[in-house]
């Protein structure tokens, strides 16, 4: 414990240089901009800006990139409340009560509540990371291939079990990711797989390109279809409103705490920020005294989803740092960045590069404080950006996405693939296929496959290796349990006597 | 959430789209599995062969895709009213998608800067009905800003075409 505090202090020394503070500021500003603009989000925003950081030191680069992520998390709330347009999927739940509040002229109050609860959620998650990450990392040092595969298996099972989408669609999305990851040279045996004689496929699909296409172009196509007309309310936040709102917020400590716990749980077991925000909103609605008034502009209805989304978004970095398994698409992109800088995320990172790890953790504290101050003071500007007509914003974002896809490998093939992924993203979103499992499977595909094959080698080809000791056995059992969770829910529903006249479930 | 309106002419129904995507997934699964069989799914001299893992993936794709297709067919009648996208909604999507495809093709020949300028200008004039001065300022300003940011400050080369060669870059 004391050692961790010591390490953290050293981390602050790394993060608190003028240069890094400047990167933090730039990162937050870019992040909020990304969060506000449709078609650019945390994941693809970081992916596009990744090549620009190659010339920086890894610590500065990751500080800037993670600050972009915090900024995007903050920025999503602005559009949700003022324009009823969620800038990010995890701020959809914020629109339920945030937009009605804005219509009643309480936009300032809603936004103060949103930003403050985001901050609280993130802070809770960072404190959790500070004390839990070293323990997890130490624990994970003992992991062998079967354990790593088991943890990855758990990751994917929790997508199926915890997601809001139909399980079959989650599985399709995930398996497509794995299949795309398998394209190209097989690193273990050196065989070419699924290249069908096309030389451009030799290197396989890069997940950064997929992220930019799926989340960037796909989102733009969706926005075009909805025929975007920004009809927003004016936003002004002055110190009085902030102070008055802050005084009311402690009343909702229970909602906040619950949201923090939901968020952290969903972030670590990659349920992700989006389901966390919905779940937290639902719980708050059920437990609140004013539950029936949710939807007409309850401040609690803003606090709950925002806190959970930020807690989940932040805690998604815990498995990324300690196990090398990202909890969200954005964490996956950050992981990709670490690999490019030659840093292998995982338990050894804490031993080999303590200054990097603790610098990053310290920057999470600072970044969120800087972020809160920035968003509270600059809201009117961001609202003004949204008044720029979409006919200007859309082509510019597409150009930026194309550049982002090109700079990954300096290949035009990737730009063409981005367009293909954009169409897939559009169709998948409309048919409610989740996109996050596809991206994570694409990132983890090679790792999961290698861990699986090494485990098989160890055991001589029997599945029993995954139950060979208590540790790996219990992770696998937990994973299978979560995988079957939706099934259990269905069975319970069947067992319950139905009220007469209720429609037969289709 | 459902768009339960009576489908008009030219609307794409959700059930058809659902079925088509599910069948494409099954087809994808078959391709993956066949390729896995080609490279070998058995146990080689030095452990599992390259197709060992992908074969599972291919099978899972077939099963999951088949499941979704079957479920859609099972509920076929009750899904009748769901519209995936209406004709008036589809227009703007293609107005975005087709120029974007043209833009990507143009990059091969003209480089990214000239293509972006044309793409942004065309989009603003055609879709946004902007006046020439605003259009010209944006369409020239954005590529120039990108050029400064990438080529000059961060030294990241982007695709260039005849125009850049002409001005000696």
Image (tube, coloured by chain):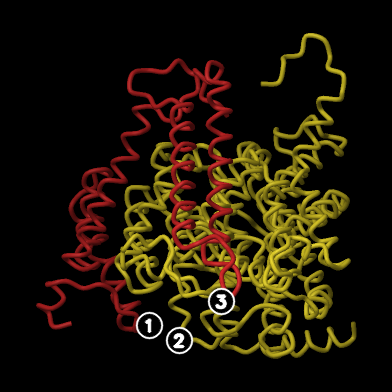
Chain colours: A yellow, B red
Percent x, y of residue A345: 65, 78
At mark 3, the secondary structure is helix
Q: Label 1 marks which chain's residue?
A: B
Which residue is farthest front? Answer: B45
Q: Residue at x 25, y 49 (%)?
A: B99
Q: Label 3 marks which chain's residue?
A: A
Pointers 2 and 1 within a single chain: no
Percent x, y of residue B139: 24, 60
At mark 1, the secondary structure is loop
Total of numbered circles in the picture? 3
Q: Is A66 situated left or right of A190 in this image?
A: right
Image quarter in which the N terminus of chain A is found: bottom right
Mark number, residue A55: 2
Mark number, residue A61: none
> Mark 1 — residue?
B154
User: B101 or A459: which is nearer to us?
Assistant: A459
Q: Residues within 10 Å of mark 1 (few under 14, many from 20)?
A: some
User: A126 or B49: which is nearer to us?
Assistant: B49
Q: Are marks 3 and 1 in contact (CB under 8 Å)?
A: no
Mark number, residue A64: 3
Percent x, y of residue A437: 59, 54
Q: Residue at x 38, y 69 (%)?
A: A202
Of circles 3 and 2, the one toward us is 2
- Residue A224 vertical placement versus B32 (above, below): above
Q: Earlier in the sequence, mark 3 or mark 2?
A: 2
User: A373 or B26: which is nearer to us?
Assistant: B26
Gap between marks 3 and 2, in whole Å? 13 Å
């Amino acid at each position: 414990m004391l050692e961790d505090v010591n390490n953290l202090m050293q981390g602050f020394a790394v993060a608190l240089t003028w240069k890094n503070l400047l990167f933090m500021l730039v990162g937050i500003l870019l992040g909020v901009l990304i969060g506000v603009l449709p078609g650019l989000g945390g994941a693809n925003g970081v992916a596009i800006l990744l090549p620009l950081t190659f010339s920086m030191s890894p610590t500065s680069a990751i500080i800037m990139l993670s600050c972009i992520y915090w900024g995007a998390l903050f920025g999503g709330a602005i559009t949700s409340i003022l324009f009823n347009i969620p800038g990010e999927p995890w701020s959809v739940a914020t629109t339920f009560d945030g937009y009605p509040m804005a219509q009643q002229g309480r936009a300032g109050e809603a936004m103060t509540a949103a930003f403050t609860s985001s901050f609280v959620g993130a802070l809770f998650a960072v404190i959790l990371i500070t004390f839990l990450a070293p323990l997890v990392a130490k624990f994970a040092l003992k992991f062998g291939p079967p354990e790593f595969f088991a943890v990855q298996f758990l990751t994917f099972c929790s997508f199926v079990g915890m997601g809001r989408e139909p399980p079959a669609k989650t599985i399709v999305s995930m398996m497509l990711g794995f299949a795309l990851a398998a394209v190209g040279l097989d690193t273990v045996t050196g065989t070419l797989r699924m290249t069908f004689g096309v030389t451009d496929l030799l290197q396989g699909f890069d997940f950064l390109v997929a992220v930019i296409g799926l989340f960037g172009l796909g989102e733009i196509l969706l926005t075009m279809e909805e025929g975007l007309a920004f009809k927003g309310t004016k936003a002004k936040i002055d110190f009085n409103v902030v102070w008055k709102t802050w005084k009311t917020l402690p009343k909702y400590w229970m909602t906040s705490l619950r949201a923090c716990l939901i968020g952290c749980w969903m972030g670590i077991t990659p349920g992700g920020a989006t389901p966390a925000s919905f779940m937290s909103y639902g719980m708050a609605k059920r437990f609140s005294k004013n539950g029936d008034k949710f939807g007409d502009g309850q401040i609690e209805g803003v606090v709950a989803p925002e806190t959970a989304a930020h807690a989940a978004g932040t805690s998604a970095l815990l498995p990324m740092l300690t196990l090398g398994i990202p909890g969200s698409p954005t964490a996956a992109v950050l992981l990709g960045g670490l690999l490019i800088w030659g840093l292998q995320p995982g338990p050894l990172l804490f031993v080999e590069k303590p200054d990097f790890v603790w610098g990053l953790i310290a920057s999470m504290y600072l970044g969120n404080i800087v972020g809160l101050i920035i968003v509270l003071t600059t809201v009117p500007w961001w609202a003004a950006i949204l008044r720029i007509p979409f006919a200007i914003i859309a082509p510019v974002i597409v150009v930026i996405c194309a550049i982002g896809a090109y700079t990954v490998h300096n290949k035009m093939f990737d730009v063409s693939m981005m367009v293909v992924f954009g169409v897939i993203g559009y169709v998948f979103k409309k048919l409610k296929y989740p996109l996050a499992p596809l991206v994570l499977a694409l990132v983890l595909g090679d790792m999961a496959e290698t861990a699986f094959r090494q485990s098989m080698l160890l055991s001589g080809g029997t599945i029993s290796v995954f139950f060979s000791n208590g540790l790996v056995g219990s992770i696998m059992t937990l994973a299978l349990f979560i995988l079957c969770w939706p099934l259990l829910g269905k069975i319970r529903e069947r067992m319950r006597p139905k009220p007469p006249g209720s429609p037969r479930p289709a | 959430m459902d768009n339960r309106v009576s489908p008009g002419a030219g609307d794409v129904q959700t059930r058809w789209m659902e079925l088509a995507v599910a069948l494409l997934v099954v087809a994808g699964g078959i391709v993956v599995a066949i390729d896995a069989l080609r490279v070998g799914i058995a146990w080689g001299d030095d452990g599992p062969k390259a197709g060992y893992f992908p074969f599972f993936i291919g099978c899972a794709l077939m099963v999951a895709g088949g499941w979704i297709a079957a479920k859609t067919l099972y509920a076929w009648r009750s899904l009748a009213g769901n519209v995936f996208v209406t004709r008036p909604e589809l227009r703007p999507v293609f107005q975005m998608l087709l120029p974007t495809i043209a833009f990507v093709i143009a990059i091969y020949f003209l480089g990214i800067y000239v293509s972006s300028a044309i793409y942004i200008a065309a989009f603003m004039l055609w879709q946004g009905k902007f006046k020439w001065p605003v259009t010209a300022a944006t369409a020239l300003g954005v590529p120039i800003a990108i050029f400064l940011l990438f080529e000059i400050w961060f030294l990241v080369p982007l695709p260039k075409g005849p125009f850049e060669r002409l001005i000696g870059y």
